[in-house]
Image: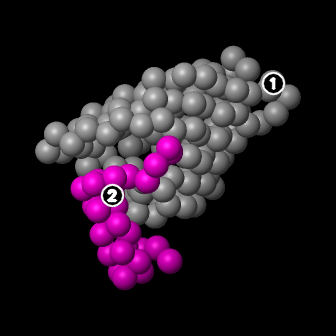
């Protein structure tokens, strides 16, 4: 349980640094990241995850996660994070929402991370995600 709690803390803290290389170092080569906030909600492999992170970090000024709880069993390669999320986007738009992450991991690498936010992104961030998602589909970046 302690191993997962430390991985959860490190993963969310690293995201707040907006350092793409450092975040990618937490993922296995063939990792899957699923998050409806991104233009490509299901990112498979580091190249796809990197594209999503570059998009996210290009839009977010600051991020903060407060881990409320983690759940895991020492004999299982997965765990759950419940977090209070605060993002500030360029232009001063603030988002505060709860979300749950389900994480599959092995040897301190994330193999699958799925976000379950309490909502879809509202307002301008949601519009930005939708427009980017449409553009990526039209340009063939995603299906």
x, y percentage for residue 52?
A: 41, 56
Give the side of residue 67 with respect to residue 92, left or right: right
Mark 2 or 1, nearer chain start:
1
Give the structural element (helix, strand or loop) at label 2: helix
Quick one: 2 or 116, which is closer to the camera?
Answer: 116
Above or below for 91 versus 132: above
Q: Is residue 35 visible?
A: yes
Q: Which residues are magenta?
A: 117-143
| Residue 74 disc label | 1
How many neighbours does mark 2 have within 10 angstroms: few (below 14), some (14-19), or many (20 or more)?
some
Above or below for 23 versus 1: below
Q: Residue furthest top?
A: 2
Quick one: 92 or 143, which is closer to the camera?
Answer: 92
For image coordinates 38% across by 52% down, the residue present is 121
Please check the rendered image and state whether residue 142 is part of the magenta-colored stretch, yes or no: yes
Quick one: 74 or 69, which is closer to the camera?
Answer: 69
x, y percentage for residue 123?
A: 28, 54
| Residue 126 disc label | 2
Please check the rendered image and state whether residue 120 is part of the magenta-colored stretch, yes or no: yes
Task: Check contact, mark 2 vs mark 1: CB within 8 A.
Answer: no
Q: Give the quarter of the figure containing the N terminus.
A: top right
Give the side of residue 91 with respect to residue 10, left or right: left
For image coordinates 57% across by 30% down, the residue present is 82
Tell me where residue 61 sits by quadrant: top left
Give the structural element (helix, strand or loop) at label 1: loop
Tell me where residue 8 sits by quadrant: top right
How many neighbours does mark 1 have within 10 angstroms: few (below 14), some (14-19), or many (20 or more)?
few
Give the side of residue 64 with respect to residue 118, left or right: left
């Amino acid at each position: 349980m302690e191993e997962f709690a430390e991985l959860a803390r490190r993963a969310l803290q690293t995201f707040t640094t907006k350092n793409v290389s450092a975040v990618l170092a937490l993922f296995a080569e063939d990792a899957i990241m699923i998050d409806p906030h991104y233009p490509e909600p299901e990112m498979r492999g580091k190249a796809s995850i990197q594209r999503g992170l570059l998009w996210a970090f290009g839009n977010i000024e600051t991020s903060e996660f407060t881990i409320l709880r983690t759940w895991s069993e020492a004999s299982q390669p997965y765990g759950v994070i419940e977090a209070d999320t605060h993002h500030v986007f360029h232009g001063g738009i603030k988002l505060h929402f709860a979300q749950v992450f389900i994480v599959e991991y092995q040897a301190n690498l994330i193999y699958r991370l799925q976000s379950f936010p309490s909502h879809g992104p509202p307002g301008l961030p949601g519009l930005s995600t939708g427009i980017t998602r449409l553009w990526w589909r039209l340009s063939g970046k995603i299906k």
